[in-house]
Image: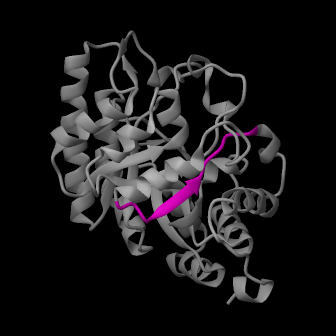
Amino acid sequence: MVPCVNPACYRLGTPITEQIRAAGLAGFHAIECSVQQLQKAIEQTSLSNVADALQQAGVVIAQCSGILPAGPVLPSPLLIPESRFQTALGEMDASLQVASDLHCPLMSVVLNPRVDQQPEAGARSSVLRLQELARRCENHGLGLAVEFVGVRSGLAPDLDGHHELTPTLGAAVAIIEDVDRSNVGLLFDTYHWYAGGGDLAEIVDLPRGLVRFVHVNDVPRDVDRDELRDSLRELPGKGVLDLASTLHALTEIGYSSCVSVEVFREDLWKLPAEVVAREAYDALSSYFPLGRPSSGEANQ
């Protein structure tokens, strides 16, 4: 598996070039990023400057969020109001071209765990929208990774609603299977999987090739599953989740791509990006035979 880091680990608004450099110095081989931040960096400098920064750091962009943007950094979930969805479609080709130009293979989108509409209607809308996003991604040679949200507490308003829709791994898989597009798969997040009541057997039962990307993080001690929220995520190895067995189960279904550290912690946001990346890398390295490059190697 390939060590990777998610921008949520850093203070909101940390420039993408700073994220790239910090990840390379820490030893990461790949990063995730917001496509909005990529576009901003290209506007301020150039596409070639961003590409050069990636090459110098020795990292690649493994996955981009923001196919449905929410402002300059954050992504929106799939079932945003129709007017916002249509606006996003009108701007989407430019975003997808940026990702493609920087050799990023994958975009991501988040399913709505709860909705106000009836679940059957929400599922139909989810499938239709994912099919449209998949078609547009395919036009640019990109895949689409679909993430489900298993936490029940502290949901943002655009993720909440009166009815459950896709709060579990099984519900997300059913939606993806109904989409039935070869470039669409699952973004598996260990925290959301655990919060949604997951067990190892359901990972092993997943179809080979369905998982396209993995977020790895840990679960705090002494917190009930129903009380878990994103702000309580721990770095790998700091909590109660059996990550070794979870990652092994993923390898059993043929997954060998990125495992990306994604935590939302205010204590990390107060630190310089290089320190955050190093702590994330060290936490992940306990599960893999990773080595940190020398300063010279990191900048070759």
Residue 97 falls within the magenta-colored stretch: no
> Which quarter of the rendering shows the C terminus?
bottom right
Give the residues drawn in magenta, as a range. 254-265
- The spot of residue 218 in percent (x, y) is 64, 41
Q: How many badges with numbers are in the image?
A: 0
Q: Position of residue 211 (x, y in %)?
A: 35, 52
- Is residue 224 depicted above or below 131 in this figure? above
Residue 49 location, x and y as percent? Answer: 58, 79
Residue under the image location 48 percent in, 57 percent down: 35
Q: Is residue 258 magenta?
A: yes
Where is 131 relative to 122, above or below?
A: below
Which quadrant holds residue 140?
Answer: bottom left
Q: Quadrant of residue 203?
A: top left
- Whether 9 is drawn above or below 219: the answer is below
* Image coordinates for residue 109, horizontal then vertical, percent: 39, 44
Kindly identify the residue that appears in the image at 66 percent across and 68 percent down: 17
Q: Is residue 84 left or right of residue 286?
A: left
Image side of residue 122 versus residue 98, left or right = left
